[in-house]
Amino acid sequence: MTRAPVVTGRHLAGPTGAHDVVAGRSTPEEVRLFLAAGVPEILTAALTPLLPSGLGPVRAEVTRAKLKPGRSLAVGVDVTGDEVGSRPAWVTWGSSSAAASAVTDALVSRVTDAQRRPFSTLALPPDASGMRVLLAPVDPAFPQLVDVYDPVRLARVLGDADLNAFDERLSVAPVRYRPGQRHVVLVESADAAHRLFAKCYRDDAGRRSVEASTIVAEALSRWGGPTRAARAAGYSASHRVAFWAGHGGTRLSRVISTGSDTAAALATRCGAALRAIHEHVGSGAAWQERTAHGAGRSDPAVEAGATRRAVEHVAALAPAAAGRLEALVQDTVTELLELPDEAGHVLHGDFKCDNILVEDDQRLVLLDFDRVTVGDPALDVGKLSADLRWWGQTQGRDAADLVGAFLDGYGPCPPARHARARHYDVLFQLRAVGRRIPLHEAGWVESVDVRLETAERTRGNG
């Protein structure tokens, strides 16, 4: 395997380096500068020697970053160039990073020349700073991804799944490349008449997701409203890949963030669709499998723990926010645990605007059934409420009208469910503070303050 060039991991144009960022010795502005300018500079210096002499330059732009203070930093980057095209990369520092698994010779041998070109390798082992670099489609946690990116091999996988509209002339384009976490690609036939989304899994969760989609589809069909579930096209057990029919339409998040006049009506429709799912009583293996685990209950303490993990870097970079964050989490979960709970309802599990497509300005298509389960319906209600606030606020509105429209569509329910939903709303708002405010963009501290104020108002409106 080609060894990585010696790169220090320190911002070549400034004093702050990756170790400073991971250790928590950097201010938010220093973190921003390192991510926005330092990482592209370091990555292009590392990749240039992997290209044939005279080929280049390559350009790099950070698209996302995940900081776990004291443990790791993971950065998603788009790499482009005149001879390189466009390729997603994943750069990490720290022993606990999701992409820290060694890239084996067996995996490297599966990478075709066409997939690798023009680079001499797609995986750089740790350098002196501990920096690791992976370029799509390499991911040691998802070895099947190499096959999914290869038209010849993927055509055989599709054929085995009885998807015979695709031959070796198909095209593959990355939609999401997150080593150690998740991968999605868009697959199109040579004549562009057929398209699928392929999602890779580390275990048989893809099979369960396909099964879960039938539960949601049945619930929406019985309701009869203008909403349907995305159609599962097939599943490959050998490669742990689920294939989903390609759908048109626009994500609800974009509809809201562009200020569409239809947003409130669509939010009402979302509420009615979600109520149909919650009230559904299904049958079959998939339903039984889900009801058999945990007696169909949701756990506020688990949700609080996930929220605390999501905001670790916020507390580290903005100490003034740490107390506000912890008080919100602690008070919210305490009150949640004091309320009467509910169990056994079908939940979508990830009911948010990015998982809802809008077709022809009125029909909805629900996506992503990886987290379909049974439990407290207030969790789903709180999640979409928080998400509506997030996207509404991108338009400078408090989004109370969107949340109100959503709850109107959901309809009457026990007061305790509404109360629990508001508390989950707060927890999911805080989780978004940790996961969605880009560290590599200006105004991070100000954005954190604004979002915390919204969460505090939400909690105070009970």
Image (spheres, rainbow, N blue to C red):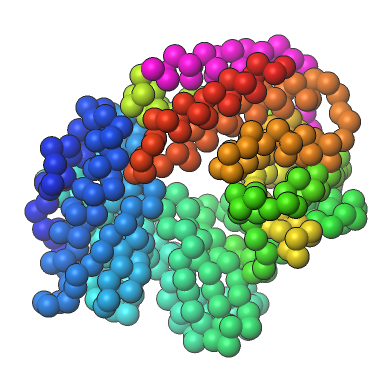
Which contiguous range is marked in magenta?
Answer: 320-346
Q: Is residue 128 visible?
A: yes
Q: Residue 52, how many percent across, how many down? A: 15, 77
Nearest the camera: 303 or 61?
61
Q: Residue at x 33, y 74 (%)?
A: 85
Taking 322 as reference, is 408 above or below it? below
Residue displayed at 78% across by 25% down: 418
* Residue sitting nearer the eye, 358 or 133: 358
- Give coordinates of residue 338: x percent, y percent: 71, 11
Q: Is residue 275 visible?
A: no
As for residue 157 lying within the magenta part, the answer is no
> How many marks do you count on the picture?
0
57 relative to 205 in the view: left or right: left
Q: Nearer the viewer, residue 129 or 410?
A: 410
The C terminus, quarter of image:
top right
Magenta stretch: dominant secondary structure: helix
> In screen coordinates, is 180 left or right of 71?
right
Residue 386, position as x, y percentages in the image = 63, 34
